[in-house]
């Protein structure tokens, strides 16, 4: 079966994946002389940097997702298809998906990253990850359901292990999640669960390396640790998870923490696609690309964003797996494709490091912008401003702003609906948005 | 196993169900000399009158739900338990639930209503209902997934049956849903699904009786039909559904409509509880109560809201199954319980008809307030004002207001995330919020 797309005189660009890379590429090709087909398994773009706020009850899911059709409603050359991509066939310039096959003139692999459990199957079975909206909602349900269960138990180990939460991974997601949980424990839960003694609830943040936010400045790492400890988070460095059976988390330095909630944010890997020759796969499950983001040896195939690893002058020199790199990839590639149509010369991709930032809690954030480094209240406002500006869609910006203002003024994070229970569903039956009913 | 609730010198009121009746009863007993235990299978109150806006992409689910613990965070005498009630045992003054057993001094059955398919099992299997937030989200996903499938088909019957939507039941829910769908078809879908021809999409509203909004004035019914037809809804009166196999809806006057989406809003029935003696059950699956909302023959047991049917002076004289009746029941019963504590005299329950209203679309609503009846723009503003005022929680009012203002100004209803696919799951495995993992 073929995917039905109207005939066009323009060359066809098929983009697999509508994350930061794929979305920005498609946006820059709006109403330009290409026919663009965007394929994604979800019908919406997810603003991943704020997933942790959905998981911790600060934002609604709709506020950080935008339907692709909404974004492209006035772009007659952009065609969205909700489908799971099965395999690419570069030899015949075709892509096979769950809804049929489509040919391309140019193919862009923008399939992003997925959680990396480094082969620890037991951890994968029992830990929670946070890479998609359904996962963020499951996490929210898990915390709240565990507290509902704890209310009905006597004080003791079982109750404590329902209340304690372990966050593994000291990158931005781990830091932000631990900080938000600590604020819930301080300002929200004690009023709502008056029968529980929150002195026994521990929020742990565990990092295998020697410092938090390892890609940021030493100063940012130190301040982050200080802020988290002020909020009551128990931070453990140089501590790697070795096993988690759903009951007890064990670490390589002998630490053992009984907990029913373990959030794994300690690793990602590329999420490549069937049909890419194995010799093109490099470290971290990523696809090798040259300085023009071309996949070497495959005609008219590009890879962008987290799944792409740049290889130039004979050695691997990949951009970090962060949103700004993916956005720059998408914008560069759009520009290149437009230049190709006009037979104009093309320069190589050059990454601009935009700096990095993380928020720990109310009035507490850290920002590194090149040599400009600051922490505290001003950093927190900068963090909020930047995230609002990068959010997709005016409605979302408005609603997120209203929510943040409300949360700030009221100390309340009231989005505590358990709309779906936490259930481990066998992977082949996962009923989340990945699945497209036939 | 016993449900753990702290000891108290005050008598214990157990309320089963936190809909409009149970919630308002508990609110009026805040910080009063009763220990109140509120049991609900969800951890949040649902503002049912706006469910249709969640289903049609105008509001987020969190905006019309409020966690009970959030509502009662400063009330030390109110104890919430998330549990499914299994059976009441009036003889021993106990309630058995999925998390254990609890004794009561006073029991209030406030279990509300559920969808009534009048024994048509095939319809129940294949139609969508809209009584809870998970159902509203499933409906939203169904519409959008069907359109995503239609995009990939050639023009023909199969495509048309994916686009056509049949709403059965001309009460407020049916009218409001059909109106909102017609607006999506006019203002939103054509921009977003540019490849589909929305001239072939039909929105049907089918009512078995002789007019829409049968409980309102003739004038309101007429205007409603006129407004809906102006919006392009195909209204059929005196037309009862006889079968729906998931493909074709068949009606008692020979009408047949092929459709993949049938929404059933044509009936509700009481949702009583195991343990109520069968002789107390009356028409519509409701529990007989006297003028004091007492269940006759059972000591200290009351029923309020949709599940209660008043029987006085030897005949059945039930209040309508609407929110204002449930709210009045709850408030009356709170007042009565407080008078009992003070040994004050008690008057019988007297229902105040607050009138009724329904919205059809932008600037189009009908309002009957006793002899005061009006339709159009002013009615629409009144409808919005009343619904905002009755919403629970300031945050929800604020966010709903912002959304409505945005939708009005932009003609956009952008909440089109398919977060969960539409799947028919066998009832015993339903993974929605009803289930509380052990």
Image (spheres, coloured by chain):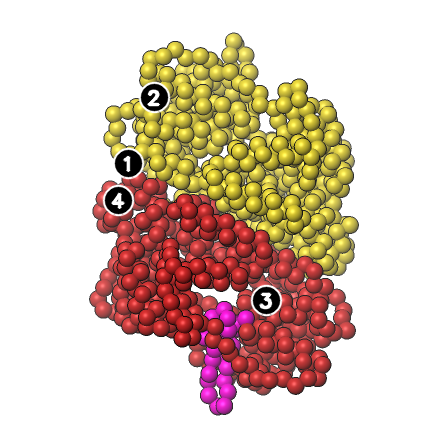
Chain colours: A yellow, B red
Circle nearer the N terminus (3, 4): 3
In the rendered view, would you say B301 is above or below A207?
below
Q: Residues within 10 Å of mark 1 (few under 14, many from 20)?
A: some
Q: Residue at x 61, y 71 (%)?
A: B25
Q: Element type at marker 2? A: loop
x, y (%) of residue A305? 49, 26
Q: Nearer the viewer, mark 2 or mark 4?
A: 4
Query: Is residue A417 something one can see in this rendering?
Result: no
Q: Is residue A146 left or right of residue B350?
A: right
Is B414 covered by the magenta stretch? no
Q: Quadrant for residue A43, please give it.
A: top left
- Which numbered tag is attached to residue B197? 4
x, y (%) of residue A380? 65, 34
- The answer to whether mark 4 and mark 1 are in CB contact below 8 A is no
Residue annotated with mark 2: A91
Is B325 covered by the magenta stretch? yes
x, y (%) of residue A296? 43, 16
Q: Residue at x 53, y 53 (%)?
A: B63
Q: Nearer the viewer, mark 3 or mark 1?
A: 3
Query: Is residue A411 something one can see in this rendering?
Result: yes
Q: B182 or B98, which lies in front?
A: B182
Residue annotated with mark 3: B23
Indicate the chain on which mark 2 is placed: A
Q: Element type at marker 3? A: helix
Q: Quadrant for residue B19, please give it.
A: bottom right
**For the residues marked 2 and 4, what is the alpha-carbon distance in whole angstroms?**
36 Å
**For the residues marked 4 and 1, what is the alpha-carbon distance in whole angstroms?**
15 Å
Residue annotated with mark 1: A4
Magenta residues span B305-327
- Image quadrant occupied by the C terminus of chain B: bottom right
């Amino acid at each position: 079966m073929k995917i039905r797309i109207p005939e066009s005189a323009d060359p066809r660009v098929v983009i697999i994946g509508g994350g930061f890379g794929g979305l920005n590429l498609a946006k820059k090709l709006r109403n330009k002389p290409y026919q663009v087909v965007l394929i994604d398994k979800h019908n919406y773009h997810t603003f991943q940097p704020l997933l942790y706020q959905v998981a911790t009850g600060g934002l609604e899911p709709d506020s950080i997702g935008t339907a692709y059709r909404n974004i492209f409603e006035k772009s007659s050359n952009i065609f969205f298809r909700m489908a799971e991509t099965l395999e690419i066939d570069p030899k015949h310039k075709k892509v096979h998906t769950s809804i049929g096959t489509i040919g391309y003139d140019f193919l862009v692999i923008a399939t992003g990253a997925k959680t990396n459990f480094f082969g620890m199957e037991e951890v994968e079975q029992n830990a929670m990850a946070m890479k998609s909206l359904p996962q963020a909602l499951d996490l929210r349900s898990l915390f709240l359901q565990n507290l509902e269960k704890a209310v009905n138990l006597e004080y003791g180990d079982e109750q404590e292990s329902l209340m304690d939460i372990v966050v593994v991974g000291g990158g931005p997601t781990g830091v932000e999640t631990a900080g938000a949980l600590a604020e819930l424990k301080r300002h929200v839960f004690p009023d709502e669960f008056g029968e529980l003694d929150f002195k026994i609830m521990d929020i742990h943040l565990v990092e295998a390396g020697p410092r938090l936010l390892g890609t940021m400045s030493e100063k940012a790492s130190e301040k982050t640790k200080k802020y988290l400890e002020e909020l009551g988070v128990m931070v453990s460095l140089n501590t790697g998870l070795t096993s988690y059976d759903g009951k007890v988390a064990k670490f390589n330095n002998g630490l053992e923490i009984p907990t029913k909630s373990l959030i794994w944010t300690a690793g990602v890997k590329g999420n490549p696609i069937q049909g890419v020759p194995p010799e093109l796969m490099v470290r971290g499950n990523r696809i090798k690309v040259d300085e023009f983001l071309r996949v070497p040896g495959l005609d008219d195939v590009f890879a962008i964003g987290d799944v792409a690893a740049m290889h130039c002058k004979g050695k691997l020199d990949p951009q970090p797996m962060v949103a700004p790199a993916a956005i720059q990839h998408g914008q560069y590639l759009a520009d290149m494709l437009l230049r190709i149509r006009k037979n104009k010369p093309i320069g190589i991709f050059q990454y601009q490091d935009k700096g990095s930032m993380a928020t720990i809690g109310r009035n507490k954030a850290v920002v590194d912008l090149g040599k400009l480094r600051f922490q505290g209240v001003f950093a927190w406002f900068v963090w909020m401003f930047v995230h609002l500006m990068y959010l997709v869609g005016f409605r979302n910006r408005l609603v997120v702003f209203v929510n943040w203002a409300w949360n700030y003024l009221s100390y309340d994070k009231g989005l505590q609906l358990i709309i779906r229970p936490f259930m481990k569903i066998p992977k082949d039956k996962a009923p989340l948005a990945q699945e497209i009913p036939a």
